[in-house]
Amino acid sequence: MSTPLTGGRIIAEILQAHGVEHVFFMDAILRRALVEMEKLGIRRILAHSEIAAAYMADGYARVKGKPAVCMAQSVGAANLASGLQDACLAQTPIIALTGRQPAAMQYRNAYQELPHEPMFRSTAKNSMRVDDIEQLPHVLQQAFREAVTGRPGPVHIDVAGHTGDAIAAATLDGYPQAVQPFSALPGFRPPAESRLIEAAARRVAQAERPVIVADQGICTSGAQQALRLFAEQVSIPVVTSLDAKAVLPETHPLNGGVAGTYSRACANQIVNAADLVIFAGSVIGDHVSHNWTLPRQDVPVIQIDADPAQLGRNYPGSLGLPGDARSILEQLAQACRPARRSAWLDRVQGFVRQWNDAAAVACASDSVPIRPERLCAELSAVLPPDAILVSDTGYSSQWTGTYVQLRHEGQRYLRAAGSLGWGFPASLGAKFAAPEATVVCFTGDGGFMYHLPELETALRWGLKTITVVNNNHCLAQGTRSILGAYEGSDGKREEIYHYRPMNFAAIAQAMGCVGIRVTQPAEFAAAFEQASASELPVVIDVVTDPQALAPLPWTP
């Protein structure tokens, strides 16, 4: 007769079976399971907040291409749900576990008693309860299945017991194990129907000025090589969303840059001039299309996405190809004849040269305080071929998306889907996922202050991360809007978006990390070299111009 298994052991075994190597959490949650995880070699990463734990899991899963796990006790559920917003928007597979008071204590004003499902309804694909130990294996394995199939995303499990202890301590005489663990993205690789591929191939053959807009689904599918081969075969330029920046090296002659709202002018000009736009791995949100104006609604569109419900949502006249991005690009490569579009590619490269020439002026600026464009140029020059650049949202995304050049095929770019402060914890998750890679976080002082205590987490775990702080002691992205709100009148406008100047290098040093302060543009390269040689987490505190404004998107 088999020895009964505790819920804690079952959780640890199922995580191991699905390839989970790290769990990110805020105490107190599933302590019996954490003990069992240690026995199975799963590393347990204690964060300083539930939101930071969720952000770490997000960065980890994006780099690893596998589901990540984060956990919090009952009262931390609201924070954990909030932390999953970026993962939901970025289609990141995460399993989020929370504890809650058991059924006998519900509706009696018990300690920390609140319904958790409504909190996760907007930020997770599904929210499931485990009220009995017999439910646990099925629900947990189903969570992994849902997280990586269809449109990937977070899945929430609410476990009975204030810290999940009611389930973790209960026992079960064995359980059915999944024959096919859903442990990586994508869960399936469905191709498109042949009739749809044939229709798309005809559109490609007829187009004189086609362009591919590569989006997040290319990364999710691991379709970078398929994208490159198809684009080269049929001579189609590629622009990208911020999420897909660097799926094609930015020095590649077909790469037209980042398009949309946080963009390079040349990329938007290319999309505007195209007579066919192929959105690859895209739900065609407002950012990549700049509020659905690029392209115009009358321009032919082919849309590739894993979620059929997204096809035609924002461009009703588009030809939808439901399925896996890599599979479909490989199908298109077989169906489309090689083509040369010399006149169109000359025009595309003209747009790119024009933008490069204009950007070179700001990128060479010796102004003090340092211009962010110059900071991005200096960073581009020193990023190694294995670099993973993790960018915060707001101006951090605009500056890096526009001015950082990722020149090597092995480089990667991750960015927040909207939550300021995401960048630094996500970079720690990325480093756990790829310990040998050079992980660089680019954030502003406003974003860094959200989760600055996670420097201790990086130090505790020996993470050699490099954090570049664009330190302008303000939330500069709001400058134009705030000036507009004042309508030229005098007032204390700095009260609503300026901070006191801070020395983040000194703060890092006080916490036992390495801090380097940069006040002159020419100092950055040496600072980065010093950071790369360090065995400790490093903060490079770059004093930048608070008056610097990122360029507005090019529009027709």
Image: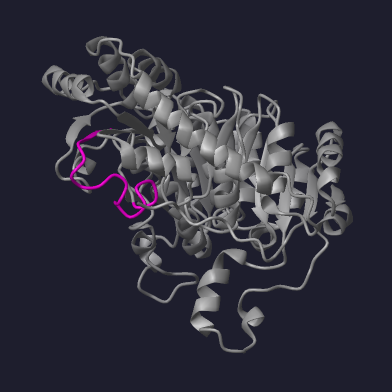
Q: Is residue 442 left or right of residue 91?
A: right
Asked if the stretch drawn in magenta spans residue 409, the answer is no
Q: Main secondary structure of the magenta part?
A: loop
Q: Quadrant of residue 551?
A: bottom right
Residue placed at 16% from the left, 20% from the top? 202
Q: Is residue 199 above or below residue 259?
A: above
Residue placed at 80% from the left, 58% from the top? 368
Q: Is residue 396 above or below residue 500?
A: above
Residue placed at 66% from the left, 25% from the top? 386
Q: Is residue 93 left or right of residue 517?
A: left
In the image, which residues are magenta?
A: 286-305
Which quadrant does the N terminus fall into?
Answer: top left
Q: Residue furthest bottom?
A: 490
Residue 36 screen position, x and y as percent: 59, 35
Residue 302 screen position, x and y as percent: 23, 33
Near-viewer residue (37 or 64): 64
Near-viewer residue (337 or 181): 337
Q: How is the image coloured?
A: one colour
Q: Is residue 480 left or right of residue 513?
A: left
Q: Let me know if residue 360 appears in the view.
A: yes
Residue 109 screen position, x and y as percent: 42, 76
Q: Let me know if residue 169 appears in the view.
A: no
Q: Quadrant of residue 482?
A: bottom right
Near-viewer residue (232 or 186): 232
